[in-house]
Image: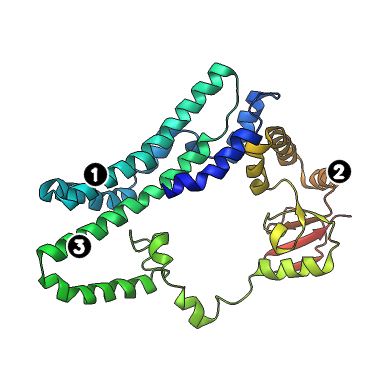
Amino acid sequence: MASILGMLPFLFTYFLKTEVEISYDRLLYNEAFAARIPDFFSSPYLFMKKWLSPKFLFFALPFVFYLFVGFWKRGIHQKRALTLMVLLFFIVLLPNVSAYLESLINKTFGLNFRMAFQLIRIQKLAILIPYFSIGFLILTLLEMKPILKRMFPFLLGTYILVALASSSYVISNVPFFSDDITKGIFPNFKGIFLGTTFQKTDFDLMSDYIQKNTPPESIFFGNYMLRSAAKRSVVLDNKGASILIEGNPKGLITWFQHKKVLKQLPAMEKVKYLKEMGVSYILTKGNGFAFLNPTKEIGTLKLYALP
């Protein structure tokens, strides 16, 4: 329910403000869309296949176990099991159905709704259902085996200790302990003790340099985070293209065409092409523009001012 309420502003804005009539090359738009968004975000079948990995199947076990418990013990357990099943239906099945429904509407009425790929992402919330199942299974075991109540503080303490070390290499590939939920409970104590958590990265230092030593109106070709970190304009980045998908399909096509041309050009021609687009600086990690003299180097980052 909270997810649905949270989406209402997006839905209202989309239907009231977004252009869905096709006034551009639909095939070219689809090509640009595919260049930015992975196939599984627009194909329910491909997204569902991702759930069949060993990691996610591991998380399915507590859910299945609790379904058996719910229908065996009945009462409150059965109500909880049914609630989890309903949640699974809304989180997984409905977003997948939306993709086929959107495709049908677009083909029937000659429109170009572009919302289903966002709804399919909601399936990620399905990972919460196994966590609820684990909690309910623990409560059930404590009810059935009172001796476990005396062991519970020890088990909880063990989990906390493992959670504290969840960012380490040893645990980083262990299901349940390596996921974002467990990792997000506590801060990275290893980084705090070593002092690395509070150290500025190379990108932070470069952003500070750019903000102090380049004109505010400068246009960059590079990491999209320069927009917020250095308060500078960035062109032809993938993050910016994502914003164009729903609100400005013609802009997405233009982005795709520029990227396509740029990819085919040799390095020196790329510089000329970027200058024609108004770019004044390039920020890169590679050596693709080694024929230019870098204005600033920090770590692997190189800043080039276009001549």
Left or right: 83 in relation to 103: left
x 70%, y 33%: residue: 253
The residue sitting at 81% across, 70% down in the picture is 212
Q: 204 left or right of 181?
A: right
- At label 2, the amino acid type is Glu
Amino acid marked by disc 1 = Leu
User: SS for tag 1?
Assistant: helix
Q: CA distance from mark 1 to mark 3?
A: 17 Å
List x then y, in percent, for residue 275: 85, 47
Residue underneath mark 3: 139
- Seen from this angle, which residue lies furthest top? 108
Crowd class of label 3 (few under 14; some 14 to 19; many from 20; radius 10 Å): few
Dot 1, crowdedness within 10 Å: few (<14), some or many (≥20)?
some
Specify whether 307 is left or right of 270. right
The numbered mark, 1 or 2, whose residue comes first in the sequence reads: 1
* Dot 2 crowding, Cα within 10 Å, few <14, some 14–19, many 20+: few
* Tag 2 residue: 276
Between discs 2 and 3, the one toward the N terminus: 3
Residue at disc 2, secondary structure: helix
Residue denoted by label 1: 82
Q: Is residue 227 left or right of residue 185?
A: right
- Note whether residue 65 is visible: no
Q: Position of residue 17 (x, y in %)?
A: 66, 35
The front one of 124 and 301 is 124
**Which image quarter: residue 197?**
bottom right
**For the residues bearing labels 1 and 3, Cβ distance under 8 angstroms:** no
Q: Quadrant of residue 269?
A: top right
The picture places residue 277, in percent across and down from the top left corner, at 83, 44
